[in-house]
Amino acid sequence: MADNAPILEDEQKPAGRSKLIMYAVIAVTLIVEGVVVFYVGKNSQPAPAEATAVIEETTELESEKFGEVQLALKYKADNYKKGRIRTQVTLSVYAQVDLEAKEKMDEFVLLHNSEIQDAIRTCVANSEPSFFKEPTKKTIKRQFKNSLEKILGEGSINEILVPYWSQMDISD
C-alpha cells in the first residue's frame, strides 16, 4: 500500500537545488567579507609622513665632547658576599671625562693608580651579588663613580664605562 501513496510537492523537489543555493550564499558571504577586510586594511594605514622643514643645522656628536681615561684593564677583584663561594670578577673600567681635562686626568690616574684600583676592588668586594646580575651594571657604575670622584675630584667624571665584565664563582 505504501507504493500507491500519493506523492506530495515537497518530496518532488530535487535535493541538489537547495544545496546549490546554500553554497551560493556562503560564497557571496565570503566574497563580501574579503572585500570589507581588504578595504578596511587598505584605508586604515596611516599616511606616510611628509617633511615640513629642512634640517639645516648639524649637531655635534656628544662623544666628541668627552674623552676616555683608562682606570683599570682586566682587573681582578673578589667578592665573598655569597658565604663560602667567592665570586671573582675580572673587569675593565674607563672614565668618560671632558675632552679638555683628558690629558690632565691621564697624568693624575698614573700618579694615583693604586688608590684607584683599591677603590674599584673595595666597590666589588662590598657589592651585593644581585648587582652583578644587572645587565647594565648601573648600581656598580654608580658606586665606582662615587668612590673615584673622591680620588679624582668631584664632578671630574661624566660617566663610568665598563666595557669588559667577567665573573666566576669559585668555591673555597
Image (cartoon, rainbow, N blue to C red):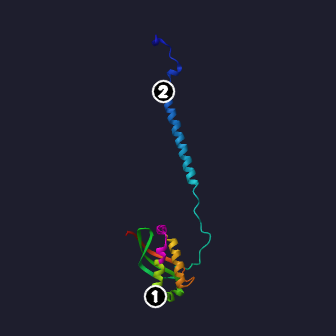
- How far across and down, in percent of the image, does residue 98 sit? 54, 84
- Residue at image x 48%, y 77%? 122
Q: Does residue 65 show up?
A: no
Q: Is residue 126 magenta?
A: yes
Residue 147, image x and y in percent? 52, 79
Q: Give the image location of residue 43, x and y in percent.
A: 58, 54
Foreground pick, 12 / 144: 144
Q: Which residues are magenta?
A: 122-135
Q: Is residue 6 above or below residue 91?
A: above
Mark 1 and mark 2 lie on one chain; the one further toward the N terminus is 2
**Can you say whether 84 is above or below 144 in the image?**
above
Give whichever of 104, 6 is nearer the camera.
Answer: 104
Is 29 colored magenta in this rendering?
Answer: no
Q: Which residue is at a point 52% across and 71% down the rendered structure image?
A: 139
Residue picked out by circle 1: 110
Whether pointer 1 and pointer 2 mark residues with C-beta atoms closer than 8 Å, the reply is no
The relative height of residue 10 versus residue 75 in the rendered view (above or below) is above
Residue at image position (60%, 68%) is: 51
Within 10 Å of the Cα at label 2, are there few (<14), some (14-19), or many (20+) other Cα atoms?
A: few
Residue wearing tag 2: 15
Q: Amino acid at mark 2?
A: Ala
